[in-house]
Image (cartoon, helix red, strand yellow):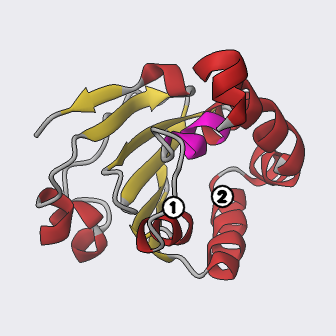
């Protein structure tokens, strides 16, 4: 990726935050600021359906959750053996995290680098930790599927995060 070669990871992060989150997805930010969890549901239902994502959304009074079983963008790269940014999956938290902070939310998120991830959005004032597998999304929780835990790559985790810099690498 040219940005990384010329400006390092910080320039890539700036691209995600400003060009995607601050510009091309401004409509998402406006919708979420105005309608909160209902805005999240409306935005992702439309966007993920258009992208052909394999996902399930779960909404309750205190959280909005997405379980991504088949990310169309990462899946395309993997299926076609295409070169990609060394931590491609970070692009989502790179623009979504700062947008959520601006809207008054934080993110619990984990991805396995194989086209699967989960997201829980909560109000920034809500100290509730991420749910245990299956408790919020039931059988739709991506963490319950054998291919989630059988992936050889380490997973990346974000707890009550609003930026890509808050990543924790999980080696199990």
Magenta segment main secondary structure = helix
Image quarter of residue 33: top right
Crowding at dot 2, Cα within 10 Å, few <14 / some 14-19 / many 20+, comes out as many
Residue drawn at point x = 83 percent, y = 38 percent: 19
The disc placed on residue 96 is none
Tell me which label, 2 or 1, sits earlier in the chain: 2
Name the image quarter holding the N terminus. top right
> Which numbered dot is residue 40?
2
Q: Which residue is mark 1?
A: 82
Secondary structure beneath disc 1? Answer: loop
Q: Which x, y percent locates residue 133? A: 19, 56
Q: Is 43 contained in the magenta span?
A: no
Asked if residue 134 is positioned above or below residue 155 in the image, the reply reads: below
Q: Is residue 60 left or right of residue 144?
A: right
In the picture, the quarter occupied by the C terminus is: top left
Looking at the image, can residue 32 be seen?
yes
- Residue 142 location, x and y as percent? 28, 65
Expressed as whole percent of the image width and height from the top left, the position of residue 143 reads: 22, 60
Stretch in magenta? 90-95
Horizontal side, residue 148 vs residue 90: left or right: left
Label 2 to label 1, Cα distance in Å?
Answer: 31 Å
Q: Is residue 131 left or right of residue 45?
A: left
Give me the residue at 64% from left, 74% from top.
45
Q: Nearer the viewer, mark 2 or mark 1?
A: 1
| Label 2: which secondary element | helix
Q: Nearer the viewer, residue 104 or 172?
A: 172
């Amino acid at each position: 990726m040219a940005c990384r070669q010329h400006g390092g990871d910080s320039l890539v992060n700036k691209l995600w935050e400003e060009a995607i989150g601050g510009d091309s997805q401004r409509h998402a930010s406006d919708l979420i600021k105005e309608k909160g969890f209902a805005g999240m549901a409306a935005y992702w239902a439309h966007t993920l359906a258009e992208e052909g994502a394999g996902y399930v959304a779960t909404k309750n009074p205190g959280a909005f959750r997405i379980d991504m079983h088949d990310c169309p963008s990462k899946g395309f790269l993997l299926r076609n053996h295409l070169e990609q940014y060394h931590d491609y999956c970070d692009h989502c938290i790179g623009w979504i995290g700062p947008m959520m902070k601006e809207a008054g939310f934080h993110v619990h998120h984990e991805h396995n680098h194989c086209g699967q991830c989960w997201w829980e959005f909560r109000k920034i004032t809500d100290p509730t930790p991420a749910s245990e597998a299956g408790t919020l999304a039931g059988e739709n929780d991506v963490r319950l599927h054998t291919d989630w835990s059988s992936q050889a790559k380490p997973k990346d985790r974000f707890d009550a995060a609003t930026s890509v810099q808050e990543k924790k690498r999980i080696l199990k």
